[in-house]
Image: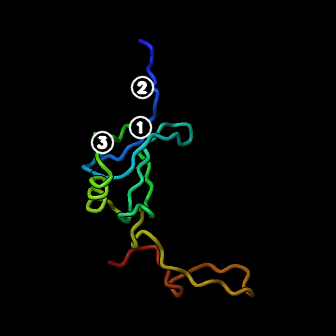
């Protein structure tokens, strides 16, 4: 059976993604090549005007379901289901800038840097 123009077109719609691990995300979803591998790209809005968003990529094998929806519905799902790409406890505290006189500064506990989390 020959491929139709519709079958060749890439997916690019507002949708709800359902991923393994009971993850639901809403946003603009499309297929994109990353390092030669087809991936699912989702732009998850931070505001209703879609001026700022987080972009996340997932391998196709992580996809459990996809539901095309309106932009308003995608925003509603994004608002209640998105998790930030990095959490504060995953990042070291901001380090002070090194003086121009010092060649190399290795951060230690006096800089507020620890290699463990304080909960």
- Label 2 or label 3, whichever comes before in sequence order: 2
Q: Is residue 23 above or below residue 32?
A: below
Dot 1: within a 10 Å radius of its alpha carbon, few (fewer than 14), some, or many (20 or more) residues? some
Residue at image position (27%, 56%) is 77
Q: Is residue 104 above or below residue 63?
A: below
Could you tell me residue 57's position as x and y percent?
44, 48
Could you tell me residue 75's position as x and y percent?
31, 57
Q: Is residue 9 shown left or right of residue 95?
A: left
Of residue 36 and residue 4, the one placed in the foreground of this image is 4
Give the tally of numbered discs: 3
Asked if the residue at tag 2 contacts the one at tag 1, i.e. Cβ–Cβ closer than 8 Å, the answer is: no
Rendered image: mark on residue 11 = 1
- Residue placed under numbered mark 2 in the picture: 7
Dot 3: within a 10 Å radius of its alpha carbon, few (fewer than 14), some, or many (20 or more) residues? some
Say what secondary structure mark 3 lies in: strand
Of residue 99 and residue 49, the one placed in the foreground of this image is 49
- Label 3 or label 1, whichever comes before in sequence order: 1
Residue at image position (73%, 81%) is 103
Could you tell me residue 14's position as x and y percent?
35, 47
Quarter holding the N terminus is top left
């Amino acid at each position: 059976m020959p491929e139709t123009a519709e079958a060749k077109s890439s997916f690019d719609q507002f949708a709800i993604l359902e991923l393994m691990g009971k993850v639901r995300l809403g946003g603009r979803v499309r297929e994109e090549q990353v390092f030669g591998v087809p991936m699912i790209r989702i732009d998850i809005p931070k505001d209703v005007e879609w001026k700022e968003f987080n972009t996340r990529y997932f391998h196709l094998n992580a996809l459990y379901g996809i539901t095309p929806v309106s932009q308003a519905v995608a925003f509603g799902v994004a608002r209640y289901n998105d998790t930030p790409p990095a959490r504060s406890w995953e990042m070291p505290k901001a380090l002070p800038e090194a003086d121009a006189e010092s060649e190399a500064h290795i951060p230690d506990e006096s800089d507020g840097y620890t290699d463990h989390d304080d909960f």
